[in-house]
Image (cartoon, rainbow, N blue to C red):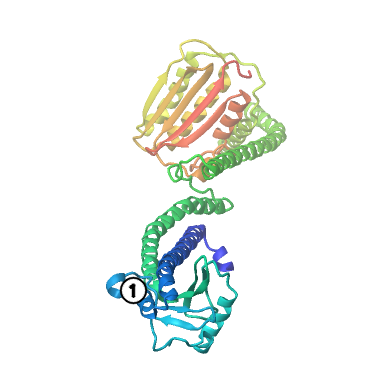
Amino acid sequence: MKWILGLSFRYKIPLWGGLLIIITELAVAGTFMLNAYDDLKENLHIDAEIMSYSLKANLIPAILHDNIGRAYEIISAPLDSTITGSNPVNAESILVVDNMLRIVVSVHPKSVPALTEMRRLSPEYALLADRISQMDELSSQEINLPGSKYYYYVTPIANEIAHLGTLIIVYPKDVFLPRFAHIAWQGLSAGAIILAILLPFNWYWGWRMALPLVQLTARMGEISRKWPENLDPELYAHRDELGRLFEAYTQMLRYLKDKEELEKKMVQSERLAALGQLSAGIAHEINNPLSGMLTAIDTLKCYSDVDPHTMKTITLIERGLTQIKDTVGALLVEAKIHSRNLTPQDIEDVLTLITPMARKKGLHIGWHNSIDEEVALPATFVRQILINLLLNAVQAASQQGEVNFDIGIANKQLQLSVENNGKTLSDEQIAHLFEPFSSLGESGHGLGLWVTYQIVHQLGGHVSVKRESNNQMHFTVDIPLGGAA
């Protein structure tokens, strides 16, 4: 039983359903057969009652006149096959006994001779004689002796004057067995047809009900390892308890995915904030001695008389220190300084700055600027965002490729997008794209996109990137008008 309970619902529901159908069918068939058996017995009782009433009425005159021959004819007539035909409840024997329980007349005089005491015929007849002696002299009775193969229907023969004797009709117990077997066979055949219809239907219904549960269980088992696939809404479209369970699972999965996405964003934001603070602290510590060294080199160049070879070395040191200064400056993103508002010319200036680099790679630039008036955003930082994104797009675009740029105002926000073809990024690379020192190219220090991220968030905006189906990388920036300046 335990192994059955441990089966999958795909098998357990059809098996239990089939078992219940079989039990129900057996119970119905058993009840039907018992009722049929009782009906046959009732028919036997009615037949015996009618026969005994008829025989008793005819036997009284014959017994009163001691006409044994006539009495024999009377009791033999019901057993004549030419009269009874194929009646399935024919009696096997009929006999009449007197008040002393001696045989008066019998349809089988050789085996049951006249004037023989009933008790001497056989132990069964002796037991029957005892039961007759205890009967009411006015009412008929059916006697069923334990272990006997016969039913005995006993009727007192009496009139208003005297009790003349007793009529005994003997029926074999298997008299209606063929008829009962026929009825039972019909019932079993009908039951088999019903089972042949219900069992396949039950199996399909059970499998159809269990399949959604099996898939739901499999999906929930995958949650700890990976995000499972969504359930097919057509798998179970009903609004019962199972349908609501499906709906609850879908809502739970959506909630967990949103929660994970939010946690990732929070972790990324906290990591970027920590890196920003660390970078800013390091930049401030480097900037002070760096400024002193650059001032010293500038003084040395202006007031010292050095040979050309030494001057070349000093110039080389100056360029290196200047590069360090530029890198440090990129780390010091401060959106708290005041700046003038953004104008359409600021945006066109950016196009002028990136055009030479784009020409070297033979790029096509799709430029769409719908800004035609001053915008309440700090021009310095918006220009920096545009330069960083466009330079990054130009560097990442393939030779003879294209870069598309679009900027405009919508929903009280400055909305811009930069798109380029070329090598696409993986999900892992995109996840760390806005972190400092995460350059994906052969040149650059990996700070441009991080600086862009910092500026956009300090202005209260949002920056995102996605990989398009046509192998293009698409950056979008939304900044609310009137952002920090």
Q: Residue 354 or 201: which is nearer the viewer?
A: 201
Quarter of image, res 258: top right
In the image, taking residue 425 as reference, residue 363 lies left or right, namely left
The residue lying at 40 percent from left, 69 percent from top is: 58
Q: Residue 20 or 203: which is nearer the viewer?
A: 20
Quarter of image, res 51: bottom left
| Residue 450 coordinates in the image, percent (x, y) | 58, 34
The residue lying at 47 percent from left, 22 percent from top is: 350
Q: Which residue lies furthest to the left in this view?
A: 82
Work out whether 65 lies above or below 340. Answer: below
Q: Residue 430 or 108: which is nearer the viewer?
A: 108
| Residue 336 coordinates in the image, percent (x, y) | 67, 21
| Residue 225 coordinates in the image, percent (x, y) | 56, 53
State whether residue 362 appears in this view.
Answer: yes
In the image, taking residue 26 as reference, residue 197 lies left or right, namely left
The residue singled out by tag 1 in the image is: 77
Work out whether 404 lies above or below 39. Answer: above
